[in-house]
């Protein structure tokens, strides 16, 4: 099993951060029903108000590294990333086997 974790930081010039977070989550969350490789999919908004935090976290599980690769290259995933990238200034990710 592979765990894939991604953190998203919204751009500083976004005025309505709550609306932007909801857009990102609502764009990414449906992927769980569109991509068979996803075994677990969770998204959440950060509530801590610290300068060093990210705004959104995504945690997902896949059977193996190949399944994670198919997810990353899936057309639905690519479309979702294209839709949200206008809101995102930075990301960080970690992939590891569990």
Image (spheres, rainbow, N blue to C red):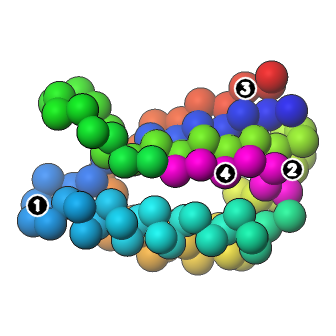
Q: Position of residue 36 (x, y in %)?
A: 86, 64
Residue 39 in magenta stretch = yes
Q: Please provide percent x and percent y for residue 89.
A: 29, 52
Query: What's the residue at 23%, 61% (across, down)?
Result: 18
Callout 4 crowding tier (Cα within 10 Å): few <14, some 14–19, many ≥20: some
CA gap, disc 2 and disc 4: 14 Å
Which residue is disc 4 drawn over? 41
- Residue in front for this viewpoint, 55 or 81: 55
* Residue at screen point 89% across, 39% down: 64
* Residue lying farthest to the front in this orientation: 47
Label 1 neighbourhood size at 10 Å, few (<14), some (14-19), many (20+)? Answer: few
Q: Give the SS element for disc 1.
A: loop
**What residue is shown with label 1?**
13
Locate residue 76, reporting x and y percent: 68, 75
Picture disc at residue 96: 3
Quarter of the view holding residue 73 = bottom right
State the SS at label 4: strand
Mark 3 vs 4: CB contact within 8 A = no
Tell me the magenta residue range. 37-43
Chain-order first, disc 3 or disc 1: 1
Gap between marks 2 and 1 measured at Cα: 36 Å
Q: Give the number of the mark in front: 3 or 4.
A: 4
Q: Disc 2 marks which residue?
A: 67
Q: Earlier in the sequence, mark 1 or mark 4?
A: 1
CA separation in Å, label 3 and label 4: 15 Å
């Amino acid at each position: 099993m592979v765990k894939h974790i991604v953190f998203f930081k919204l751009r500083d010039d976004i005025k309505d951060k709550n609306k932007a977070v909801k857009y990102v989550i609502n764009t990414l969350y449906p992927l769980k029903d569109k991509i068979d490789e996803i075994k677990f999919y969770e998204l959440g908004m950060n509530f801590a108000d610290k300068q060093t935090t990210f705004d959104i976290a995504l945690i997902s599980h896949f059977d193996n590294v190949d399944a994670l690769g198919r997810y990353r290259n899936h057309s639905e995933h690519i479309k979702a990333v294209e839709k949200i990238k206008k809101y995102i200034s930075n990301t960080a990710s970690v992939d590891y086997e569990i």
